[in-house]
Image (tube, rainbow, N blue to C red):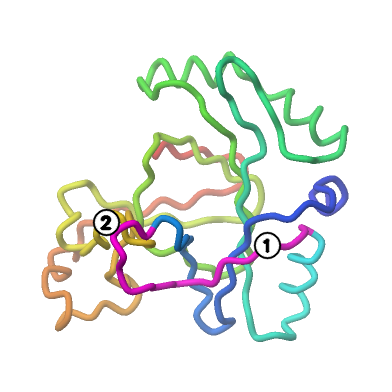
Amino acid sequence: DYLSEHMGNQLYHTFASTQDARRFAYSFDCRNEGGYEPARIAEACKMTFQDFVKKQQAHEDGKAYYLQTPVLRYEDGVITSAKFDDEMEADLHTMNRPLVNELAAMGKFGELSRNQLFVSFRDFLTAAHYDQQHNLYLQLRGCKKFLLFDVTCAPALYPYPVHHSLDRKARVDLEHPDLTGWPRAKALAGRGIEAVLEPGDVLFL
C-alpha cells in the first residue's frame, strides 16, 4: 500500500513471464554487442507501479510480473532519486548512510552507487546470475530464498557469452537441469548454499 501510494505515475522497468513459469531475468537487446541470436527468459516492458500491482493481482493476461528500479543514485557526491512523492523521497533520505559507509569500508566494497528496489510476488524465480557490484540485500516484506554458488562453480553453470543480451546469467535451469545438454552441471550437486531471508534480514552478495 505504501509503494502504491507514493511511487507516482512514472514508468518502471518491469519483466513479464508466464504464470506457469514465473521465471525472470532481465535482458536488453542494446547490450547484445556480440550479435547473438536474441534470447529472453522474460519480456521487458514498462508500466506504473499501480498497473504492475493490478496486472499481477488480476491474472487476466496469463502473465506474471517482476519490477525493479533504482530509488537513489550516488554520483560525484550528489544524491538523486526517482520521481517519487515528497514523503517517500524524505523517507529514503533517512537511511543511515554512516552505517552503510562503515559496512562498505569493512567489506572493501568501494563507493556506494545506488539503492535498488525489487518487487515480486509469491513463488517467483530469478534465473541464476552474478552481479557486477557488491551489494547488501535487505528483505523488507515476505521471504526470499537464495541459492549461492562460489566462483569455482561457474563452468558448471554454463554462463551466456560476454556481450550476449543475457550476459552474466546461467544457461542451466537449476529447477530442471538438462544434464544431457549441460553435462558439467552434475558438479553442482551439493555445492549450493541456501539462504532464506525474512523481513529485516540482510545478505551480503
Question: Is 38 or 158 nearer to us in this picture?
Answer: 38
Q: Is residue 102 above or below residue 74?
A: above
Task: Determine the residue positioned at 52% across, 56% down.
Answer: 144
Task: Determine the residue positioned at 63% across, 80% down.
Answer: 63
Give coordinates of residue 22: x percent, y percent: 53, 75
Left or right: residue 57 compared with residue 195: right
Give coordinates of residue 167: x percent, y percent: 33, 57
Task: Determine the residue positioned at 35% across, 56% down.
Answer: 129
- The amino acid type, in three-letter code, at marker 1 is Lys
Q: Is residue 94 above or below residue 120?
A: above
Q: CA distance from mark 1 to mark 2?
A: 33 Å
Left or right: residue 10 compared with residue 154: right
User: Residue 46 bears which disc, if any?
Assistant: 1
Which element is circle 1 on? strand
Q: In the figure, residue 175 lies in which quadrant?
A: bottom left
Residue located beneath label 2 in the image? 192
> Does 157 lie within the magenta span?
no
Q: Quadrant of the N terminus?
A: bottom right
Residue numbers of the magenta segment? 32-49
Q: Quadrant of the C terminus?
A: top left
